[in-house]
Image: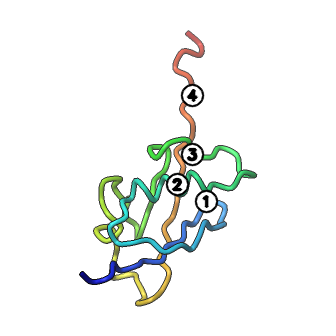
């Protein structure tokens, strides 16, 4: 069996800082990438994500689905062979308590 292809990815946060780059196999799911982001979220940043549903990953203008693999989510148009893929991280702001004011 051939060795699994490794894809180098870094995650760009809204303030311009990065998490990574780190190499992942093409069968890594987007949901597990989001878990990695949550576990590596800088402790000095406020309003960090709590669950994978608090995070949106965007690659080449496309929001990635949790159940898709990295290989399925790649955009070959914007990639440079052997280069690092930059995925943008958007954190959903915390929901206001619906019971406030009632």
Q: Earlier in the sequence, mark 3 or mark 4?
A: 3
Q: Residue furthest front?
A: 1
- Give percent across and percent down for residue 86: 50, 73
Looking at the image, residue 36 lies above or below residue 53? below
Do labels 2 and 1 touch, CB within 8 Å?
A: yes
Q: Earlier in the sequence, mark 4 or mark 2?
A: 2
- Give percent across and percent down for residue 36: 52, 57
Residue on which disc 4 sits:
96
Q: Earlier in the sequence, mark 3 or mark 1?
A: 1
Looking at the image, residue 32 lies above or below residue 84? above
Using residue 29 as the reference point, say whether residue 17 is left or right of it. Answer: right
Looking at the image, residue 22 lies above or below residue 46? below
> Which quarter of the image is occupied by the C terminus?
top right
Element under disc 1: loop
Q: Residue furthest bottom?
A: 81
Q: Which mark is residue 90?
A: 2
Q: Quick one: label 3, few (<14), some, or many (20+) residues within 10 Å?
A: many
Residue on which disc 1 sits:
14
Q: Earlier in the sequence, mark 2 or mark 1?
A: 1
Label 4 – label 2 distance at C-alpha = 18 Å
**Picture quarter containing residue 3?**
bottom left
Label 2 – label 3 distance at C-alpha = 9 Å
Label 3 – label 4 distance at C-alpha = 15 Å
Q: Which mark is residue 49?
A: 3
Do labels 4 and 1 touch, CB within 8 Å?
A: no
- Give percent across and percent down for residue 14: 61, 59
Q: Quick one: label 2, few (<14), some, or many (20+) residues within 10 Å?
A: some
Q: Residue furthest right?
A: 44
Q: How is the image coloured?
A: rainbow
Which residue is more in the foreground, 4 or 37?
4
Q: Earlier in the sequence, mark 2 or mark 3?
A: 3
Do labels 3 and 4 touch, CB within 8 Å?
A: no
């Amino acid at each position: 069996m051939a060795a699994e292809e490794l894809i180098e990815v870094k995650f760009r946060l809204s303030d311009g800082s990065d998490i990574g780059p780190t190499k992942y196999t093409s069968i890594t799911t987007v949901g597990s990438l989001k878990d990695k982001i949550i576990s590596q979220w800088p402790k000095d940043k406020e309003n960090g994500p709590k669950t994978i549903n608090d995070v949106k990953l965007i690659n080449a203008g496309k929001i990635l689905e949790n159940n898709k693999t990295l290989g399925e989510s790649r955009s070959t148009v914007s990639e440079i062979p052997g280069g690092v893929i930059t995925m943008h991280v958007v954190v959903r702001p915390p929901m206001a308590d619906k019971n406030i004011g009632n």
